[in-house]
Amino acid sequence: MRLGVNIDHIATLRSQRGTPYPDPVDAVPIVELAGANGITCHIRIDRRHITERDVRLIRDITKTSLNVELCTDPEIVNFICGIKPHHACLVPEREGEQTTEGGLDLSKNKEDIKKTISILKDKGISVTLFVEPDTFIMETAKLLGVDAVELNTKSYCETSHIEKEIKRLKDASIVAHELGLEVHAGHGLEYHNMKGILSVPHIVELNIGHSIISRAVFTGLEEAVKTMLTLIRNE
């Protein structure tokens, strides 16, 4: 199972004081040397943490794989097409939200999402959709022509009904796999809730950010990444 480390919250710390530090770009070689399989970052419409400058430099120095999260805003899509990261993950975005609040509504925004997928894929960028773990949504994602789905694990991470949420994730993952979609997962995952996620079949990638960056405050970034990798690999 691959680990993609989301480095957004290094930029969040930078934004708190408007200083040039800490620079998320500096995290890339540390994360990669620690053994992570890729770098993830999210460029938002309000640019409140990751900026165009960050994405350019991160793309230049990433030696593993770069996954950029974005919404369907035409300006951002055009920018990402010029950068050409290895992967693009389409996510919903609402002004004023603290973090991504849920998966994409594929029925409400279907045409806009379909158009964005086509634009990105025409540039040779692999496309993932961040979605709720629902079997019908997996079928819709397949029809839209994406390469992968990232299952939203927020409900699993916040509920007391663990078994129910694990079943939802398992059912969605199985259907996605049968449809030929690569299965990723993320949102709210941390060091104490990995066991359940690791029981879900066919997940090949986890994208984790906030918990790793938070732990790094106390242990250092390299150790925080290595500890998460140990949990994922059951070492």
Image: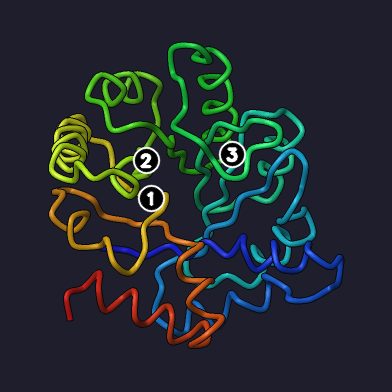
Please tell me which residue is depicted at 78% across the width and 76% down the height of the picture.
21
Amino acid type assigned to the residue bearing label 2 in the image:
Asn
Contact (Cβ within 8 Å) of mark 1 with mark 3 = no
Q: Which mark is residue 186?
A: 1
Please tell me which residue is depicted at 43% across the width and 37% down the height of the picture.
130
Residue at which label 3 appears: 123
State which quarter of the image contains the C terminus.
Answer: bottom left
Amino acid type assigned to the residue bearing label 3 in the image:
Lys
Contact (Cβ within 8 Å) of mark 2 with mark 1 = yes
Residue 219 locus on image (x, y percent): 48, 88
Circle 3 SS class: loop
How many other residues sit within 10 Å of disc 1, few (<14), some (14-19) or many (≥20)?
many
Residue at which label 2 appears: 152
How many other residues sit within 10 Å of disc 3, few (<14), some (14-19) or many (≥20)?
some
Residue 31 locus on image (x, y percent): 50, 77
Looking at the image, is mark 1 or mark 3 nearer the viewer? 1
